[in-house]
């Protein structure tokens, strides 16, 4: 058993050092593809975090026509509160309250304030149950607009939609790119092992003739591919952690009002992604080399 | 030890390597397979170590039909067969010791067994003291002795030799034949393909003659015709 292990590792090392250029190419491709794969997961998580941050404060503002009577306002409130399946809460802000809000918001712009205050409308702050779907927000907006004495309905549906579209855009494209590169690295590992086997075809022929089993012949080549995948993944993981750290520092340097503070991924998630990358690297390496070692054993 | 029953081997529509070959080789026999190039000698040897399978017929080695043998069992069959080739098939980057040790290593023999058996077999083939040399530092005859040592180090029941003297001068070839004869006298069955008339006539062993895939002569203590 010990002599077999010694043989397997010795031959694996000999093969790795004999094909340095190809080994290097396979490792680098694995590094890049797995880095992109990890990056995809982090980008998606970043969008997820940002979306949660934004949608956590999503409110619809239903402006009431200026001069609406208390009965009309009560009727409108009742109409909004009756939709318990889609609305979480309804808060009313009368014209005095609205004037306070405007005074706070436009404190530095007395001209605009002077224009607003004489005819400022009262409004309802409506918090919907589903805050992430721009379609739901849009549908509620259309419904509320038909209610009597409603001047206007404002929702952040456009911003939510842009963020959702960006998440989909980057998520799908980076995922496709990383899958293509993962395939490329599996093919490169496959080719490296095939070349290594071809270079040692005479040895393999002798091994077969003296009674070595196929598994005994295959194992060093399979370990070689496995190692290439794992080393590639480890390098990709290190690079990913470095880039993530750099990005996080950069985002934290932005002003608080930038609204981008959610675009960072911290805590244990990046480490989980790294473990996933190493596992995937091992699978890619093992599959690539096992396929080559089985297919080209009769060299 | 080896029995072929109506063995038929076809490589392509135009090339029939063997036609209904039937013969038996007893344990401890020394048999020459003779005939011109392309007569089917090497094919017979390749059928005996399961490098090839016949289209029809049975190849029995030690009582077992090796055509029906699962692929996973073939390595264990080959551990009882030694193979010698005209071009020696030595590994250029390994020393004499390593070339022979390699045959034991790949079948999982422990290091202490390798250290014991390799020098013993090198003494047997007359290469004691040359174990640290590389193949290119040896003569053709010496390289063939290393090849024989590698084939015999595991003490196989059968030695299959394909033109082992083909690349050697007559005197060196005779030395190789004396070595094979000595190995045969230890009880190992030797099957040797050759078209070296002088060697066959000198040894006077059983001769199976092939012509275009057909056995045309099977003669005890025969000569090359």
Image (tube, rainbow, N blue to C red):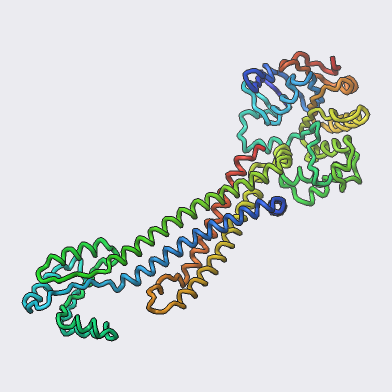
In terms of image quadrants, where is residue B103? Answer: top right
In terms of image quadrants, where is residue B173? Answer: top right
Position in image of residue A143 (x %, y %)? 16, 64
* Residue drawn at point x = 7 percent, y = 75 percent: A72
Q: Is residue A205 above or below residue A259?
A: above
**Label total for image:** 0
Q: Is residue A1 visible?
A: no
Q: Which quarter of the rendering shows the C terminus of chain B? A: top right
Position in image of residue A296 (x %, y %)? 63, 40
The answer to which of A162 and A21 lies nearer the viewer is A162
Whether residue A147 sits left or right of residue B58 in the image: it is: left
Q: Is residue B133 above or below residue A238?
A: above
Q: Residue furthest right?
A: B171
Q: Is residue B122 above or below residue A46?
A: above
Position in image of residue A185 (x %, y %)? 56, 51
Q: Is residue A113 visible?
A: yes
* Residue drawn at point x = 51 percent, y = 59 percent: A36
Q: Which quarter of the rendering shows the N terminus of chain B? A: top right
* Residue drawn at point x = 25 percent, y = 72 percent: A59
Whether residue B173 sits left or right of residue A1 in the image: it is: right
The answer to which of B30 and A87 lies nearer the viewer is A87
Whether residue A51 sits left or right of residue A9 in the image: it is: left
């Amino acid at each position: 058993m010990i002599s077999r292990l010694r043989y397997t590792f010795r031959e694996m090392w000999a093969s790795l050092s004999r094909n340095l250029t190809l080994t290097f190419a396979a490792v680098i491709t694995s590094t890049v593809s797995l880095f992109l794969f990890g990056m995809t997961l982090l980008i998606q998580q970043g969008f997820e975090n940002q979306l949660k941050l934004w949608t956590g404060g999503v409110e619809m503002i239903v402006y009431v026509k200026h001069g609406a009577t208390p009965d009309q306002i009560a009727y409108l409130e009742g109409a909004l509160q009756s939709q318990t399946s889609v609305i979480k809460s309804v808060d009313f802000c009368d014209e005095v309250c609205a004037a306070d809000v405007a005074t706070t918001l436009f404190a530095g712009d007395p001209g605009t304030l002077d224009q607003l205050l004489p005819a400022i409308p009262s409004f309802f702050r409506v918090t919907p149950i589903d805050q992430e779907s721009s379609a739901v927000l849009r549908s509620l907006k259309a419904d509320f607009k038909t209610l009597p004495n409603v001047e206007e309905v404002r929702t952040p549906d456009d911003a939510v939609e842009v963020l959702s579209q960006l998440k989909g855009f980057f998520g799908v494209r980076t995922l496709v790119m990383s899958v293509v590169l993962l395939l490329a690295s599996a093919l490169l590992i496959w080719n490296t092992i095939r070349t290594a086997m071809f270079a040692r075809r005479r040895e393999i022929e002798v091994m077969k003739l003296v009674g070595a089993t196929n598994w005994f012949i295959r194992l060093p080549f399979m370990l070689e591919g496995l190692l290439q995948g794992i080393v590639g993944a480890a390098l990709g993981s290190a690079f990913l952690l470095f880039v993530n750290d750099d990005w996080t520092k950069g985002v934290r340097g932005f002003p608080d009002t930038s609204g981008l503070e959610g675009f960072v991924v911290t805590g244990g998630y990046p480490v989980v992604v790294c473990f996933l990358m190493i596992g995937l690297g091992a699978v890619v390496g093992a599959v690539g080399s096992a396929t080559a070692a089985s297919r080209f054993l009769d060299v | 030890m080896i029995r072929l029953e109506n063995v038929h081997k076809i490589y392509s529509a135009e090339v029939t390597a063997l036609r209904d070959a039937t013969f038996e080789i007893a344990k401890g026999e020394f048999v020459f397979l003779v005939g011109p190039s392309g007569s089917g000698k090497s094919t017979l040897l390749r059928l005996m170590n399961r490098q090839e399978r016949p289209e029809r017929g049975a190849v029995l080695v030690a009582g077992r039909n090796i055509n029906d043998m699962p692929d996973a069992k073939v390595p264990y069959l080959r551990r009882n067969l030694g193979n010698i080739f005209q071009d020696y098939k030595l590994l250029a980057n390994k020393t004499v010791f390593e070339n022979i040790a390699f045959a034991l290593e790949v079948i999982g023999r422990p290091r202490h067994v390798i250290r014991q058996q390799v020098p013993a077999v090198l003494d047997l083939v007359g290469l004691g003291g040359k174990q640290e040399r590389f193949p290119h530092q040896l003569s053709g005859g010496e390289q063939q002795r290393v090849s024989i040592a590698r084939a015999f180090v595991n003490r196989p029941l059968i030695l299959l030799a394909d033109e082992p003297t083909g690349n050697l001068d007559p005197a060196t070839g005779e030395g190789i034949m004396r070595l094979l004869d000595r190995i045969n006298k230890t009880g190992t069955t030797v099957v040797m393909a050759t078209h070296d008339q002088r060697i066959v006539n000198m040894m006077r062993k059983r001769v199976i003659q092939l012509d275009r895939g057909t056995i045309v002569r099977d003669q005890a203590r025969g000569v090359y015709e």
